[in-house]
Image (cartoon, rainbow, N blue to C red):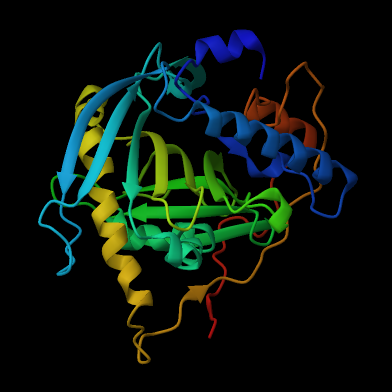
Amino acid sequence: MSSKQSAQNRGGMFPLIPIQASELPLSTSPAFAAYKTELIKLTTSFVRQLPPNDTWIPSRRFQLSSGSTSSSPRDIVVDTYQQAGPSPMMDVVQNGRVVRTDSGVKWHARCSSHEGQGSRWEQWKEALLKNFPKRQLDYVDGCTEARRLQVLEEGLLEVWQITHSLRWPRSERDYVILVLTLDTSPTTKEQGDHKSFRIVAFPAEHPDAPVRPGVLRGTFGSVDHVSIKDPNEPLIWRSAVAWNNGGGTPQAIVNLSSASTLAEQVPRFLNGLRRFDHPDPNAPPILRPPPLPVMRPWIPPPQEPGYLPGIISRRDEKTRREENGPYSSQEGQRPQETAVA
C-alpha cells in the first residue's frame, strides 16, 4: 500500500472493496507463494494500526459482566474507539454502474484485557484462530450460518459466507469474506514466551455465493489480534471492524451503535469459551463443508506499485468476463456439508 493510500485510510485499515475470488491464485501455482507473503506483510501493518494509538479516537468504556459465578458483577472492561480521518472507499451501484466512493462507514475498534487467561491459550486458539467463522455464531448477534466456499490453504486462507437473521424489521443479510488466520507465536524458546495470533477478514465476492432473493448483501472487514507476553500476565484482545449492512438503515445509525455492539461480543465469547471447561459428550459435531477448488486459474493483472489483487485495486467485472468468459458451471451450487468428528 502506498503512502498516499495509507494517508487516505488513516485509522481505517483498508478500503471495503471486495476481493474477487476468481482473481485469487491457485495454491499450487508459483504466484500463490508471493501472494501469501504480500498478504501476510499487509496484515502485519494492520495489526500495528490497532488501538490504542493516535490514529483512533476513544469512544466509550464499557464495564460488563462475564457471567461467571466466580467473578465480580462488573469484571470485564472494554475500551472502544472510532477511526480518525475519512471513511474508507467502497464500491456502490449507481444507475447500473459500479462507482467507487466514500462509504460513510467508520472503522470501530475495541481492546480488552483478560486476567488469568494465560493457561487457556490453546482454548482461545481453538475458539478463534481455528474456527473463527463458525464461532461467530456464538458471540455475534444474529449470526445464524457460516458456510465455507473455498479453501486456498487449509487453516490459513479461506473464503466464507456469513448469514445474519436479524429481528424484525431488519432483513436477513449475508457477507462474503476472505479470511486469513495466522499463528504468529515464536517457534523456539529462545525467541521468548510471548504468544500471538491474528485474524483478518476482507470483503469478497465468490461465484458460489450470488446475491439471494430477499437477502441483503452487506460488506464486512475486520482485524483481530490476540496476544500475551507471559502466562502470568493478562491476555490482550484487540479488534477492529467496519461494515455496511447493505440495507436502508442509515450508515450514521450503524456507526452510532457499533461501539456497544463490539463491546457486547466480549462477554458472549467468554461464555462460549466455557464449553471447553465442561465439554458436552452429546453435543453434535461441527459441520464443515469439504474443501473446494479454485474455480479458474489465476490470470495475473497488470502490476502496479503497491498492488495486491482485490485489495488495492480490482479489475472491472465486465472486463473480466469479456476476457475470461463466464464462471464455472458450478456457479450457484452449494457444497454438501460433511460431519467431522
The percent position of residue 275, horizontal first and vertical second, equals 33, 75
Q: In this view, does 224 lie above or below 69?
A: above
Residue at (68%, 26%) from the top-left corner? 315
What is the total number of numbered labels drawn onto the structure image?
0
The residue lying toward the viewer, choosing from 316 and 265, is 265
> Would you say 152 lies left or right of 58 here?
right
Residue in the foreground of this view, choosing between 306 and 124? 124
Q: Which of 150 and 123 is in front in this view?
A: 123
Q: In the rendered view, does 57 fall on the left or right side of 230?
A: left
Horizontal side, residue 30 vs residue 228: left or right: right
Q: Which residue sits furthest right?
A: 30
Q: Residue furthest bottom?
A: 282
Residue 116 sits in quarter:
bottom left
304 versus 287 height, above or below: above
Which quadrant would the N terminus be assigned to in this image? top right
Return the x and y of residue 64 as percentages of the image width and height.
16, 49
Q: Residue at 55% of width from left, 74% of height from top?
A: 336
Q: Where is residue 30 in the image (x, y as percent from the top left)?
A: 89, 45
x 39%, y 27%: residue: 52
Can residue 321 be spotted in the picture? no
Residue 42 lies, with reference to residue 268, above or below; the image says above
Specify the farthest residue to the left.
Answer: 73
The x and y percentages for residue 262 are 28, 41
Image point (46%, 30%), residue name: 50
Q: Tell me if I can see residue 158 in this picture.
A: yes
